[in-house]
Image: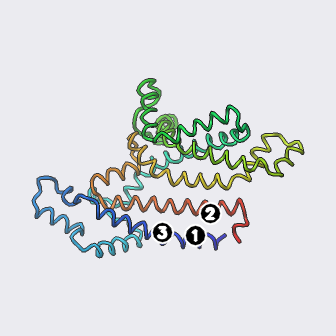
Amino acid sequence: MLNLVFKRLLAAVPVVLIVATVVFGLLRMAPGDPARVIAGDMASEETIAQIRANLGLDQPLLTQYALAMGALARGDLGTSIVSKQPVSTLIAARLGPTGALATSALTLTVLLAIPLGVLSAWWHRRAFDRATMALTVLCFSVPAFVVGYVLILVFSVTLNWFPVQGYAPLADGLGGFVHRLALPSLTLATVFVALITRITRASMLDVLGEDFVRTARAKGAPERTVLFRHALRNAAAPIVTVVGVAITTLISGVVVTETIFNIPGVGSLIVDAVLARDYPVVQGTILFFSFIYVFVNLAIDLVYVLLDPRIRY
């Protein structure tokens, strides 16, 4: 197990390096001058040149790249051009809302998708199965931002059940925390519920025809035990894969959802940094999400080993 973890961590190093290099190049190719944005429209060329020199933007690209990679190797994500604060501090300040939104959306996804997939496989080709598959197709077809605005229109504007925007931390009370996160979590979970439901259904259909399922039924085991203890356990590997993909895909969904519902998380931080041409913040947040992606994939590999020890060899 330790050998497997070491190999996965070692393989993650070049991935992070490639991501950092691509992000560095794309940001330098993007239109706009951060020094001119900071200086303002009325600034003179001398002032803009001075700001550019202070930020190191007047140096050759290779020099800027070497400095950026050296700072990254030391664990330094840089300092914001706009706020003059360390990028790690800005991310830490915004991590709470993003973590709460992602966790609640993932929890909602698993609680809805896996039972729906299991029941659809159990009632294969019946009315429940057909209705569930039609619903998943609809969820796949509608973009997340459209779902968000529809939920706001129905539950916030028309029914006035939930607030339109904003975030309440858990420290202020569980009621306000859940009330504020209900619509954003549902928006973010919609696509992933559809994906995991279909994968769970397909994996369960493959397993329900196996001999050990027929043996369990022949021994008189209750149908609930057959479905969730025998069949679901052996169908878990593809489901775990899709759940891991959903966790990593939440990154892009968080940016859109936080923007719609005005949640002060890391996604909103990225949007603000892109608009301000704040290179260090954009690069630091993308690298931070890349680290999460690598960690999640490592966790999936370890779960595979627990589900099927033969993978170790």
Q: Position of residue 87 (x, y in %)?
A: 36, 60
- Figure quadrant of the C terminus: bottom right
**Residue at 65% of width from left, 44% of height from top?**
114
Q: How many marks?
A: 3
**Residue at mark 3 to residue at mark 1: CA–CA distance:** 11 Å
Which residue has dot 2 on it? 301
Can you identify the residue that label 3 sits on?
A: 15
Q: Is residue 148 left or right of residue 216?
A: left
Which SS class for mark 3? helix
Q: CA distance from mark 2 to mark 3?
A: 16 Å
What residue is disc 1 on?
Answer: 8
Viewer-closest of 70 and 274: 274
For numbered disc 2, what is the local secondary structure?
Answer: helix
Q: Residue furthest right?
A: 219
Q: x%, y% of residue 185?
A: 50, 41
Front residue of this view, candidates 73 and 302 = 302
Dot 3 crowding, Cα within 10 Å, few <14, some 14–19, many 20+: some
Disc 2 + disc 3, Cβ < 8 Å:
no
Image quadrant containing the N terminus: bottom right
Amino acid type at circle 2 is Asp
Left or right: 245, with 22 as reference point: right
Q: CA distance from mark 2 to mark 1?
A: 9 Å
Determine whether the residue tagged by mark 1 lies in a helix, strand or loop.
helix
Amino acid type shown at disc 3: Val
For disc 1, the neighbor class at 10 Å (few under 14, some 14 to 19, many from 20) is some
* Earlier-in-chain disc, 3 versus 1: 1
Percent position of residue 23, x then y? 37, 64
